[in-house]
């Protein structure tokens, strides 16, 4: 019987790569699903592999429906873990590491500030590809910022928990990263972070943007130049790391109108420093957002972001973007072509850039065109190429 097994194995190895190979079974694994840019990436991966189940620690009803009920959750979905999930990284690490994914050939994880990368291979011929949105912020690059401005409430508890647990969590996170076969980074900045913190190489594939939903807005914009008192816009999650306080202070000092769309734990703090120039709109539907997009002259982006989907959506809409010169913004802001940078994460640095803009000529259609390279179609093609190529190479190596 053993001789027959080795005969078949050698026979399969004789054929050219790809021949006699069955279609690999894929499992998608993601940190959690309740809203944000990373979830949009998972949605596009699901469109690419609609039969693949999606394993996650927590999923909202809305996202379960968006993903065609292909989501698989466990005990972390149930009370009381739903209320405490953000404070339980050790439990999430344990849960992902113990997932039984033995029936799948490819584990395609999507991991950022969570623990999906902890999903383990149960046999050597499996392939683990990780789309990395970022090495976990509060262990690595943004640790000091999270200690100063925790996103979680109460802040004293968040600080205490992070300071107490960061060393073992960091070590476990690093070790999990060593078990991944192939890393994909969502920006050149994250590519550098993966190499610095995980000591791993990666390939950059930008996250998918729904360019087609925003680009028609650019054609209707009548904005030959930046007006004397521009109307500014921000949308997205309102958390301390986004540094909306910088934009609020800068616009107040200049006497410029600032509209903020979104919700989050930092709203009340920001309202305390805002005056009549700032308009908090909360969560709005797409029709209302389009109304404010048409009114806006500038989009302001103050965060050191892994990538930053909202500013690229703004570009697709034909709005020039003023961004902090760091992180993902370096991949899509082309100074004087579709936006401008400010060099320090302070309101004075932002003001210095903003004061130079009135009278600058802009072309909404040309600005919108710079977002085309981030379309979902390009993302689909890039992901499929790396999955197909990696699986063929990996399978060939295992056969020999």
Image: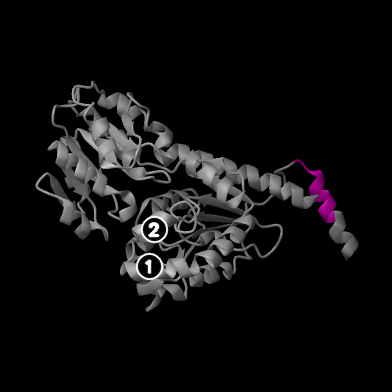
Quadrant for the N terminus, please: bottom right
In front of the other: 342 or 235: 342
Name the residue at 51% across, 61% down.
Answer: 116
List the residue tagged with mark 1.
158
List the residue tagged with mark 2.
146
Q: Are marks 1 and 2 in contact (CB under 8 Å)?
A: yes
- Residue lying farthest to the left in this orientation: 276
Name the residue at 73% across, 42% down.
Answer: 17
Q: Counting other residues with Cα less than 10 Å from the Cα at mark 1, is it few (<14), some (14-19), or many (20 or more)?
A: some
Region in magenta: 8-16
What percent of the width, then of the height, locates residue 56?
47, 64
The answer to if 14 sits in the magenta stretch is yes
What percent of the width, then of the height, locates residue 339?
31, 30
In front of the other: 400 or 327: 327
Secondary element under disc 2, as helix, strand or loop, is helix
What percent of the width, then of the height, locates residue 157?
36, 71
Going by the image, does 25 lie left or right of 352? right
Specify the quadrant of the image occupied by residue 377: top left
The answer to if 349 sits in the magenta stretch is no
Secondary element under disc 1, as helix, strand or loop, is helix
Going by the image, does 196 lie left or right of 142? right
- Residue 338, placed above or below residue 74: above
Going by the image, does 126 lie left or right of 35? right
Sooner in the amino-acid sequence: mark 1 or mark 2: 2
């Amino acid at each position: 019987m053993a001789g027959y097994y080795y005969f078949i194995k050698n026979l399969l190895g004789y054929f050219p790569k790809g021949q006699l190979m069955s279609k690999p079974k894929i499992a998608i694994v993601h940190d959690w699903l309740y809203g944000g840019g990373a979830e949009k990436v998972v949605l596009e991966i699901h469109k690419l592999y609609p039969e693949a189940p999606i394993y996650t620690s927590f999923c909202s009803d809305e996202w379960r429906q968006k993903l065609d009920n292909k989501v698989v959750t466990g005990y972390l979905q149930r009370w009381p873990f739903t209320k405490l999930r953000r404070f339980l990284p050790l439990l999430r690490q344990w849960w992902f590491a113990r997932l039984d994914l033995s029936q799948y050939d490819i584990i395609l994880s999507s991991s950022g500030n969570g623990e999906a990368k902890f999903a383990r291979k149960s046999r050597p011929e499996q392939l683990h590809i990780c789309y990395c949105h970022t090495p976990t912020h509060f262990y690595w690059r943004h640790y000091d910022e999270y200690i100063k401005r925790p996103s979680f409430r109460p802040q004293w508890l968040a600080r205490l928990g992070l300071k107490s647990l960061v060393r073992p969590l960091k070590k476990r996170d690093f070790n999990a990263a060593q078990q991944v076969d192939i890393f994909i980074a969502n920006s050149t900045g994250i590519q550098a972070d993966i190499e610095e913190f995980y000591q791993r190489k990666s390939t950059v594939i930008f996250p998918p943007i729904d360019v087609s939903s925003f680009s028609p807005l650019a054609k209707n914009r009548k904005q030959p130049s930046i007006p004397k008192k521009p109307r500014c816009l921000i949308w997205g999650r309102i958390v301390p790391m986004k540094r909306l306080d910088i934009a609020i202070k800068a616009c107040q000092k200049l006497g410029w109108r600032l509209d903020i769309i979104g919700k989050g734990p930092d709203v009340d703090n920001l309202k305390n420093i805002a005056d009549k120039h700032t308009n908090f709109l909360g969560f709005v539907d797409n029709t209302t957002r389009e109304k404010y997009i048409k009114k806006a002259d500038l989009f302001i982006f103050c965060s050191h972001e892994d990538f930053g989907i909202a500013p690229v959506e703004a570009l697709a809409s034909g709005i020039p973007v003023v961004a902090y010169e760091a992180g993902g913004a370096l991949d899509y802001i082309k100074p004087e072509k579709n936006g401008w940078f400010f060099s320090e994460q302070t309101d004075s640095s932002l003001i210095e850039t903003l004061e130079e803009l009135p009278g600058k000529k802009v072309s909404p259609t040309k600005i919108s065109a710079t977002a085309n390279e981030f379309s979902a179609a390009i993302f689909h093609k890039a992901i499929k190429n790396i999955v197909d190529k990696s699986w063929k190479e990996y399978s060939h190596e295992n056969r020999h």
